Image (cartoon, rainbow, N blue to C red):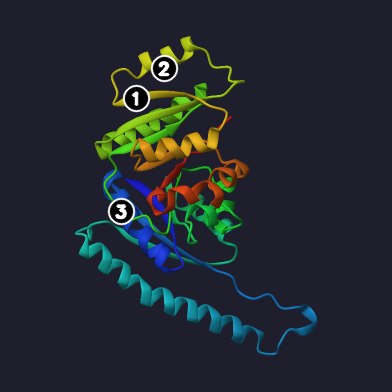
Amino acid sequence: MKRILFPTDFSETATNAFVHALEFAKMVDGELILLHSFELPVFDNQFVPENYMVIFESLQLSQFEMFKDEIPKLRAIAEERNLAQIKLSHRLMDGDLVYNIRTAIKEDKIDYVIMGTEGATGWAEFFYGSNTANVLTDIKVPLLSIPAQAIYKPIKTIGFTTRFRPKDKKALKEVIAIAKLAHAKVKCLYVKTSDSDVDKQTIKEWENDFAQEAVEFFVVSSDEVKETILDFVLYKDIDLLTMLTYKRGFFEGIFNPSLTKKFATSFEVPILSIHLKE
């Protein structure tokens, strides 16, 4: 059984992502570990109040009470979607969110992390200075990020960006395994720029290697890589986009407001980020 970590602050964005997490858990035969992380205040040593421990215990208690109140609401959502059979367990941790996620991944042997993204433009806020952006660079398991406005729908088409590297092939096999569980097809995109070094023979070898799978390959010649990926997602009806990089600068560029503006609300597509081992 797959173990899925779901960090939540119980916001509307997180609650929306919880629906996606439930459905993903059903698809991969998984269980959800809910993580609520909070940070206690830091006092200057010169001004530590006499009731220092009382303050900390009070804050911890308030976080616990909120956690205790919110969990039944999430269970109710699972019941409404006929997914009450999905196993839910919980972690309440104080400290830095990214550190806590890394700790939970190690201690709970996590296979996937699913998080909601913030902001009116979904991906834009997500990749600009948010906690989730930091998670991208710090964890080594697949991360499924859910934009705030992304309404759940069954996955029928998975987009996969590639540069036809050997390590990309391993990632594609992982994506195909997910696609089979979802009864979905995979559409692979290679953006061939003026300085691309991938030859036709390599592309043909990939097509032959995956000829028996529900996979299509698309090669688009363009020096506008980011815009081409966005167009691909929109016009190929991609339900889930797989990105094979944790380089934050790339994500910041591809999902900035100037690019996503022309797609408006129709471009709220979840991203599955897969860490590539060198």
Q: Position of residue 142 (x, y in %)?
A: 46, 43
**Disc ID at residue 152:** 3
- Point out the residue furthest to the top here: 201
| Disc 1 to disc 3, C-alpha distance | 24 Å
Location of residue 272 by image quarter? top left
**Disc ID at residue 206:** 2
**Residue at the spot 54% in from the left edge and 57% down from the top edge:** 125
**What amino acid type should be assigned to the residue bearing mark 3?**
Tyr
Closer to the chain start, of discs 1 and 3, is 3
Q: Is residue 203 left or right of residue 133?
A: left
| Disc 2 to disc 1, C-alpha distance | 10 Å
**Residue at the spot 61% in from the left edge and 57% down from the top edge:** 129
**Disc ID at residue 86:** none
- Point out the residue furthest to the right here: 46
Residue 43 against residue 9 in the figure, above or below:
below
**What amino acid type should be assigned to the residue bearing mark 1?**
Glu
Q: Position of residue 8 (x, y in %)?
A: 44, 63
Q: Is residue 42 left or right of residue 266?
A: right
Q: How many residues crowd around disc 3 within 10 Å: few (fewer than 14), some, or many (20 or more)?
A: some
- Point out the residue furthest to the left here: 82
Nearer-the-camera pick, 29 or 22: 22
Q: Look at mark 1 in the image and give the residue it sits on.
A: 216
Secondary structure category for the residue under label 1 = strand
Can residue 145 be seen at all in this image of the molecule?
Answer: no
Q: Position of residue 140 (x, y in %)?
A: 53, 42
